[in-house]
Amino acid sequence: MGDYELFDITIIGGGTTGLFATYYASMRNMKVKLLESQSQFGGKVMQFFPEKLIYDVGGYPDILGEDLVEQMISQANRHQPVMLTNRWIETIEKESDHFILYTSNGERHATKAILLATGSGTFHTKTPDNWDTLPFPEFRKRVATNLMNQDKYHNKNVVITANNKVGMGWALHLKETAKSVTIVNPDPKFHQVKEEDLNRLLNSSVQVYLESNITDIDVKENQLQSVAIHKKEQETITVKTDELLTYNGLELQATPLDNWDVATYKGRISVEGDMATNTPGIFAAGDIVQYEGKTNLIASGYSEAITAINKAHLFIDPRATEQLYSTVLYR
């Protein structure tokens, strides 16, 4: 959906800050587009702690990360803005009265103003070294790399291939609801783990394979049937599998702020109270920004998004009211 249809504001980054900014801008009756580089919205919450309870978001004594993301996507969609995934912005060019955003897949997106809610970039999950040699490449593209949609693991045979504390944490979490959990680690040990957590794993119902690799997968009618596991110097075994997850560390694809002509200091965008960058018409909010007293909290991103959107609204329409209450807008 890349074309020269002109939007009031385009938000780059679909984490919690970007999702809330999308809702707030559309609530202000702006024409809004949200572009997310990953295949899912939710940012760090989606990727790193969907299964954990969050306690510092207003209005919720506690809420699961997955539930928060789902609520925010629903809120962002209230006024049906354009929300696109798998869009990596390579460059931004300034025209006379608008910007053109160029994506890595050749699309062009036109907008009067921009809000950067990118965080430090996109984290890509590493897979085992032999991953690309396995069959069913289209299926492998869909293998989960986070614990969103946890209900699908209930009473299922789950296999996790991971070499670190994240995969181990998934195994310990899922063992309570899954029919069975198996974790396959290509390395001799799990990395970055506490001894007490390792002992919990080894004394649990989770089947643990060290120095092992998944060497084959069987998929029928798009449904995983089993995986073959080969342990070093031992025979290959076949394990009935309904769901497969993988996590072998992360690679950061840094936000290309230099290509966007946005000034940074130590990898972050310095802003004042108006959340404006050095480029007129480009604003920023969330973990990518820095200012005196900055906190990297979900709730902080909400407040920064409100300020950035209101200032962007004034940038494209100086007659706009800088602040409006939702009780007035929706009465």
Image (cartoon, rainbow, N blue to C red):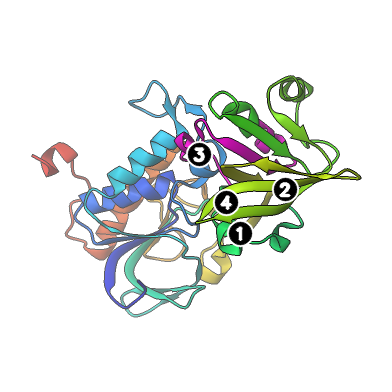
Distance between mark 4 and mark 1 Cα atoms: 24 Å
Q: Position of residue 100 (x, y in %)?
A: 39, 75
Q: Earlier in the sequence, mark 2 or mark 3?
A: 2
Can residue 290 be seen?
A: no
How packed mark 2 is, by other alpha carbons closer than 10 Å (few <14, some 14-19, many 20 or more), is some
Three-letter amino acid code of the residue under disc 4: Val
Name the residue carrying label 1.
254
Three-letter amino acid code of the residue under disc 3: Lys
User: From this viewpoint, which residue is outermost toward the left?
Assistant: 331
Closer to the camera in the image, 275 or 44: 44
Q: Is residue 31 left or right of residue 20?
A: left
Look at 52% across and 38% down and name the residue there. 296
Look at 37% across and 40% down and name the residue there. 70
- Tell me, for residue 143, which label it has, or none: 4
Can residue 170 be seen?
A: yes
Marks 2 and 3 close (CB-CB < 8 Å):
no
Quadrant where the image shows the N terminus:
bottom left
Residues in magenta? 145-169
Q: Position of residue 102 (x, y in %)?
A: 46, 74
Q: Is residue 134 left or right of residue 295?
A: right
Three-letter amino acid code of the residue under disc 1: Ala
Report helix, strand or loop for mark 4. loop
- Tell me, for residue 294, which label it has, or none: 3
Of tags 2 and 4, the one toward the viewer is 2
Q: Position of residue 329 (x, y in %)?
A: 13, 44
Report helix, strand or loop for mark 1. strand
Three-letter amino acid code of the residue under disc 2: Ala
